[in-house]
Image: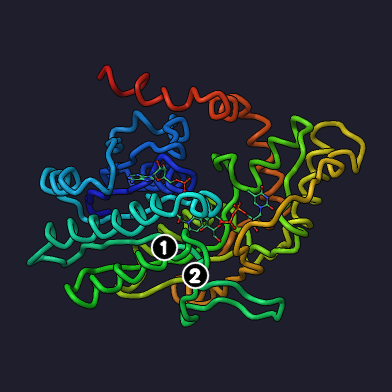
Amino acid sequence: MMKKTILITGGAGFIGSHVVRLFVTKYPDYQIVNLDALTYAGNLENLKDVAKAPNYKFVKGDITDEKFITELFSTIQFDGVVHLAAESHVDRSITDPFAFIRTNVFGTCILLNAAKESWKGNMEGKRFYHVSTDEVYGALEFDGTFFTEETSYDPHSPYSASKASSDHFVRAFHDTYGLPVVISNCSNNYGANHFPEKLIPLSINNIKNSRPIPIYGKGENVRDWLFVNDHARAIDTIFHNGNNGETYNIGGNNEWSNIDLIKALCKIMDKKLGRTEGESAKLITFVKDRAGHDLRYAIDSTKLQRELGWKPSLQFEEGLEKTVDWYMQNQEWMDNIINGDYKNYYEKQYSER
Ligand code: NAD
Ligand code: DAU
């Protein structure tokens, strides 16, 4: 295995932490630099098991800080970038779109430019991997169609519009400057370390505490759920074997309406909590719908499966049960988020070094 220095952005977040762990443990010859601003969504506790690995380094910094990013790229010669840092929550993008424009669009452009300048004259073997979302494709009807890599972009929320915009800039840097880029667009992830503002961890926490489970609208919206470790494996596969300038869709082929998903989750939780079947489902509460709520997402990942040999490893029921077990066994992780203590983790672990 060749020695490489890889920058992973957003590595303290949900998906980023799984990607960092996979790269640090699978590639001991790689130096992995995790750059994260530690926004409300960044949590270094997610990485406490690899924090002391000799091939891992954490750097606190903001991708929208051009001076800082330029200096970082001149201090460390990166062979590759896996870019996950983003504002990721659709509901937050509705209340504060500018935070999304800043990080997802402007921040991505700053990184692209830094990579272009740093690799100028020798792009051989370099790679800028942009992690994007299926939401850029818009919404599907209940008609059995899927998003493919050829589906036109049609974003609806400020979040998906910002991700779509960043995807366009990534392609523009490829086409204009020859930057070696690859993009993936993935469906909804679930699993350990998912911030409890998102449907599944929020519901697990509320069910455990016998609090209402808020379901937007009628709960008929459909998402295609993928176990986060399978996404991390796909990112590894695409980073190493994907072709420059290409896009790969990643999905679980696993469509669930929100209401069916939450009912399945309630059933699992009833068993785990020793409740009689049906008890947790009484917590389901229909609330005001999300503005511009996309009806259905469904990914066709044939290209990735056929060309690069990736496929999801887990059945959803198994993955969901594993996820519930993780949250039950890691109550402290959840408590630290709820009481805000996770924000002190950086100071405790890093500042006095
Ligand atoms: P997350 O919100 O859990 O984590 C985002 C991370 O980025 C956090 O650690 C945060 O501190 C960091 N960050 C935010 N702004 C930053 C900035 N300006 N500079 C540096 N770091 C910053 O997000 P996630 O769910 O893990 O998503 C990661 C990526 O994957 C995002 O790009 C998202 O669009 C994409 N994605 C997510 C999903 C999903 O289901 N969660 C699906 C497909 C694609
Ligand atoms: O499709 C990929 C996207 O999936 C990622 O790009 C985003 O970063 C990620 O946040 C996720 O977006 P969603 O909006 O689909 O995820 P969320 O967990 O917020 O919501 C899932 C579905 O559940 C959605 O239809 C809205 C609904 N929902 C959500 C919350 C938080 C509820 O009904 N109640 C809730 O309280």
What percent of the width, then of the height, locates residue 339?
55, 23
Q: What is the number of the mark on residue 302?
A: none
Mark 2 in CB contact with mark 1 (< 8 angstroms)? yes
- The x and y percentages for residue 305 are 51, 72
Horizontal relation, residue 274 to residue 289: left or right:
right
- The N terminus sits in image quarter: bottom left
Q: Most extreme residue toward the left, as rendered?
A: 121
For marks 2 and 1 on the same chain, the one whose residue lies earlier in the sequence: 2
> Is 39 or 262 nearer to us in this picture?
39
In the visual, does 337 lie left or right of 329?
left
Residue at 21 percent across and 69 percent down: it is 179
Look at 63% across and 75% down and name the residue there: 140
Q: Identify the residue shown where x is 66% and y is 50%.
A: 319
Q: Secondary structure at mark 1?
A: helix
* Disc 2 CB within 8 Å of nearest ligand 2 atom: no
Q: Position of residue 267 (x, y in %)?
A: 83, 45
Q: Amino acid at mark 1?
A: Lys
Protein image colouring: rainbow
Where does residue 313 sit, x and y in percent of width and height? 60, 58
Identify the residue under disc 1: 163
CA separation in Å, label 2 and label 1: 9 Å
Name the kind of residue labelled 2 in the image: Pro
Mark 2 lies on residue: 155
Local packing at callout 2 (Cα closer than 10 Å; few below 14, some 14-19, many 20+) is many
- Count neighbours of disc 1 (C-alpha within 10 A) and say few if under 14, some if 14 to 19, many if 20 or more: many
The residue at 19%/47% (across/down) is: 69
Q: Does any atom of ligand 1 lie closer than 8 Å to the CB of label 1?
A: yes
Tell me if 268 is positioned left or right of 56 in this view. right
